[in-house]
Amino acid sequence: MEQERIVGDFHTILSEGEVWKMGGFPLPDGSFWEYREPDAVVIVRNGMLYVRAPLSRQHNQVQILDNAKHMYYSVEDVKVPEAGEVSFELQIRARSQGTVPGDLYDGYVSLNLLDFSTGAALDFFASNDKYASVYAVLPFPGVEVPPSDKTRYFCIFKEDTNFKPREFNTYKITYNRAQDEVIFYVNGEEVRRQQQVPVKFNQFTIALGIMTEKDLTPEGSVSVHGQTVIGEWSPVKVTIKE
């Protein structure tokens, strides 16, 4: 049996909590760190989401809070079938100004599939001239990652350039829980297959973001230096096969 649905309705993007909400994490002091750039320009046109964000947000102590600058979470999670597979497919265009050429992590556009029950994440990152598939288990603030007799926290990036720079590309991630396998596709071509995944994903929050990935230094964040990132996303097609 195959089920398909579209997660989009970007015309509701300002009605936060209806289909999409601003991403972020609660902090130990009871406050909430929100992934929102104050000067971001948000446009919804022809069913597509466009965000132009001059980067300014930084966090000097927590890497995960420094990385994402402007991000939307889906209000509803997608449950992973016990048997069969779930796939997520969309188009993304990434363009930027003031970023370092060839340095994907200086400013990029993202699709993030986040499982807050395990700390696991499957992502695509795209910049002016490069993209990466990402497979990770992360110490998200407030999330209890299950103990492991192997490496508990990790983030494995795989970069490539076989895509259309600064144009729309089609990205797809497929996860099979029974087979512990993840497959990444770009423009219909398989670009990565991750087998023997050590964590069972239970559910995915879909996240659409503008991000950097610059390691914190002893002096704090170095992720912002006047760059602007422009992201465009189509609605996300979710397909469940059981």
Image: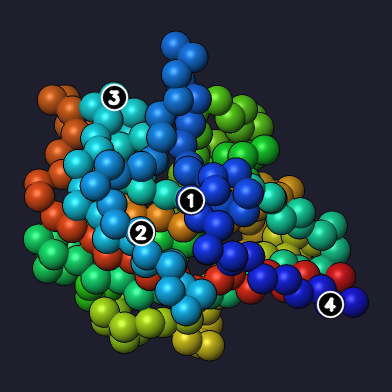
Residue corresponding to mark 1: 14
Give the numbered dot on residue 42.
2
Local SS, label 4:
strand
Label 1 – label 2 distance at C-alpha: 9 Å
For marks 1 and 2 on the same chain, the one whose residue lies earlier in the sequence? 1
Amino acid type at circle 4 is: Glu
Three-letter code for the amino acid on which mark 3 is drawn: Gln
Residue corresponding to mark 4 = 2
Mark 3 neighbour class, 10 Å CA radius: few under 14, some 14 to 19, many 20 or more: some
The tag on residue 93 is: none
User: What is the tally of numbered marks visible in this picture?
Assistant: 4
Q: Mark 3 and mark 2: span between their CA atoms?
A: 28 Å
Look at discs 3 and 1 and give the one toward the viewer: 1
Tell me residue 199's x, y (percent). 66, 47
The residue under label 3 is 61
Disc 3 versus disc 2: nearer the observer: 2
- Identify which residue, 13 or 120, lies in the foreground: 13
Q: Residue at x 20, y 41 (%)?
A: 56
Residue 158 appears in the rendering: no
Instruction: Report the Cα–Cα distance between label 4 and label 3.
Output: 44 Å
Looking at the image, tell me whether mark 3 or mark 2 is earlier in sequence order: 2
